[in-house]
Image (spheres, rainbow, N blue to C red):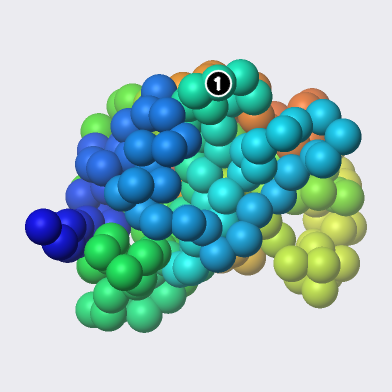
Amino acid sequence: MPKEPVIISLKESLRSLQISFLQFGTPLLQIAERLGPPKRWITNAYDQPVPLYWLYPGGLELSFEPEPPYQLTAFKLSPVGRHKGRMTNFSYYVRMRNDFPMIDTSVSDFLRSGLWDLEKVRVGICAEPNYPVLDICVGGLRIPFLMSSEREEAFEDQLSHSGIELKRRIALLDPNCDFFGAYFSLDDVEVQRFPKEGWTTISGDEYLRQLDLEE
C-alpha cells in the first residue's frame, strides 16, 4: 500500500519543541523509509563508512550517531517558513505548512508570538564586536540570530564599549540580527553556542522588559 502523506505544522513544531515524525533515537534506515533518500549528505570518508549528516529539500538537515544503528541525534530547519501560507516539501510524502513567518521574525517577535512560556525561555545576548549574535533557547530547541557583516560594521563602535547597558545592547541587536536556523537537539543547547565566551543569558520576560525600557 502507498504511504500516507505527512503534513506538519511549522508553528506547532516550534511550540511543541519537536517535529512529530522525527523522534530522537530513530535509526537511520527508519528515517530513510519515512522520508526517502536525502538530496545530498555530508560525511568524512576517512572516518565514517555511512554519511551521518543528511540534507533534504526545503531546509531540513538531520544528524545521526556515528555507531550502528546510526540513531537520529539532532535536526535543523533553515529556510523553512520563507513564504507564509505555502507548503515546504521535504520529500514526496512529507510536507510542512509554513504557518509561522520564521525567516522574517526577530527575537522579540518570536517571544511575543505566544509560542512558549517566557519564564522557561532563555535568551542569549552576545555583543562581541566581531561576532554579535542573539539566540533563543527553550527545551531542546535553539534559534540563533546573526548580524550581517554590513550591519556589524555600522554597529561595531557602539558594541565595543564594555560598559554599554544591557537594554542598549538588546535595542541595537534585536532589529538587526536575522534568523539563522532552528536547531533541535537532545544535548544542552546552550553548550552549542558560538562563540563560547561573552554571553549574557536572561529570561524571555526579562528580554522584553529590557527592550521596552530602551524604547
Residue 154: x, y in percent?
A: 83, 70
The residue closer to the viewer here, 82 or 28, is 28
Question: Who's the residue at 55% across and 32% down the image?
Answer: 64
Residue 63, visible in the rendered structure: yes
| Residue located at (27% from left, 79% from top) | 86
Identify residue for label 1: 68
**In this orientation, does residue 143 appear?**
no
Q: Amino acid at mark 1?
A: Pro
Check the image and report above or below for 170 versus 71. below
Residue 16 image position (x, y, % from top left): 24, 38
Q: x%, y% of residue 132?
A: 75, 50
The reply, left or right, for residue 66 in relation to residue 140 is: right
Instruction: Please tell me whether residue 150 is drawn above or below residue 209 in the rendered image.
Output: below
Relative side of 17 to 128, left or right? left
Q: Quadrant of the N terminus?
A: bottom left
Q: Residues within 10 Å of mark 1 (few under 14, many from 20)?
A: few
* Circle count: 1
Residue 15 x %, y %: 25, 43
Give the SS element for disc 1: loop
Name the side, left or right, on which 213 lies relative to 193: left
- Residue at (55, 64) in percent of width and height: 39
Residue at the location (31% across, 69% down)?
92
Q: Is residue 22 above or below residue 84?
A: above
Residue lying farthest front?
Answer: 1
Q: Residue 200 falls in which quadrant of the image?
A: top right
On screen, 125 above or below 160? above
Closer to us: 125 or 192 = 192
